[in-house]
């Protein structure tokens, strides 16, 4: 089965204050199968979110190639790309045009899903953090993608709204794939059917999520014992 995303000899590093370079990926090659939910594991600073951004196309890398054979989402629930002076409705209309989907359908979907009511026609800068999260999650679910990117996704609102978000996300993932970054081992176990472990610039793919978790936890123990 043809992979939906492939990384070929990708390297990414940052220069540290001491002049040395910290490698997120060093000549890494791996493939992401279609319609799979892959967890990304790694200790703090291993580069989980950076790897997600490189796959999304919003983060550059030093060398190598990333091949995408399907549509890849922005991070689910990310509100940082909304224009503060535009209303919620205007922001949605702009996104719909970029992705070539029906504007009215997306506006109606987000209006019903987010439960923002009249605030949909207020400037985004006037929104509370919870309202921004509702709009962002609604737009993320309203645009169909082959692969959804999820980085510590948390839904805002009361228990009923969070339940609605969980149900909608499960519905989307029943026909699409996802890359999932989380510090919660239980969430990785519950949601994912394969995993990637990042450690010291290396990326190891595992078909068995439990095996990946064991390797990750072993890496955590080693890092804790090192001076």
Image: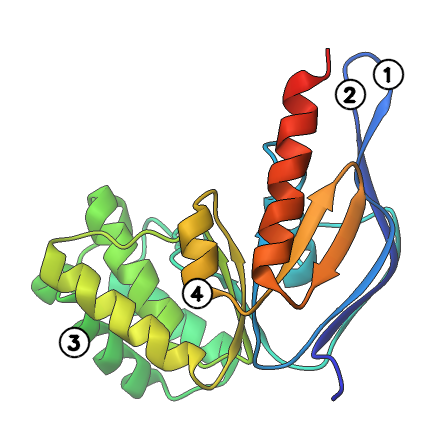
Name which of mark 2 and mark 3 comes first in the sequence. Answer: 2
Choose top left, top right, bottom left or bottom right for residue 71: bottom right
Q: Nearer the viewer, mark 4 or mark 2?
A: 4
215, above or below 200, in the image: below
Closer to us: 106 or 38: 38
Q: Is residue 161 above or below residue 81?
A: below
Residue 16 bears which disc, if any?
2
Measuring from the top left, give residue 11's x and y in whole percent. 86, 48
Residue at position x 25%, y 80% in the image: 109
Compared to residue 123, the image places residue 37 above or below, namely below
- Snapshot colouring: rainbow
Q: Residue at x 29, y 75 (%)?
A: 168
Residue at the spot of label 3: 112
CA gap, disc 1 to disc 3?
A: 52 Å
Query: Residue 191 — which label?
Result: 4
What residue is drawn where x is 74% and y is 89%?
A: 1
Q: Secondary structure at mark 2?
A: loop
Asked if the residue at tag 3 contacts the one at tag 1, i.e. Cβ–Cβ closer than 8 Å, the answer is: no
Disc 3: CA contacts within 10 A as few (<14), some (14-19) or many (>=20): few
Label 1: how many residues lie within 10 Å, few (<14), some (14-19) or many (20+)?
Answer: few
Task: State the image quarter where residue 114 is shown.
Answer: bottom left
Precedes in sequence: disc 3 or disc 4: 3
Q: Work out whether mark 1 precedes mark 3 in sequence or the reverse, and give the earlier one.
A: 1
- Label pair 2/1, CB-CB below 8 angstroms: yes
Please tell me whether mark 1 or mark 3 is closer to you in this view: 1
């Amino acid at each position: 089965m043809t992979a939906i995303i492939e990384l070929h000899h990708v390297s990414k590093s940052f220069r540290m204050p001491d002049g040395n370079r910290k490698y997120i990926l060093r000549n890494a090659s791996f493939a992401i199968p279609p319609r799979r939910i892959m967890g990304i594991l790694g200790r703090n600073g291993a580069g989980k979110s950076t790897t997600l951004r490189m796959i999304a196309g919003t983060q550059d890398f030093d060398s190598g190639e990333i091949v995408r054979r399907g549509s890849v989402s922005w991070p689910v629930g990310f509100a940082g790309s909304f224009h503060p002076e535009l209303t919620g409705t205007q922001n949605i209309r702009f996104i719909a045009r970029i992705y070539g989907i029906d504007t009215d359908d997306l506006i109606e979907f987000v209006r019903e899903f987010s439960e923002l009511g009249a605030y949909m026609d207020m400037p985004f800068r006037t929104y509370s953090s919870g309202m921004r999260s509702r709009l962002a999650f609604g737009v993320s679910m309203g645009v169909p993608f082959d692969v959804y990117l999820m980085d510590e996704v948390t839904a805002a609102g009361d228990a009923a709204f969070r339940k609605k978000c969980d149900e909608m996300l499960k519905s989307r993932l029943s026909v699409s794939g996802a890359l999932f970054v989380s510090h919660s081992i239980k969430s990785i176990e519950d949601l994912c059917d394969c995993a990637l472990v990042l450690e010291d610039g290396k990326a190891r793919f595992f078909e068995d999520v439990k095996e990946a978790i064991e390797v990750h936890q072993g890496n955590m123990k080693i890092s804790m014992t090192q001076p």
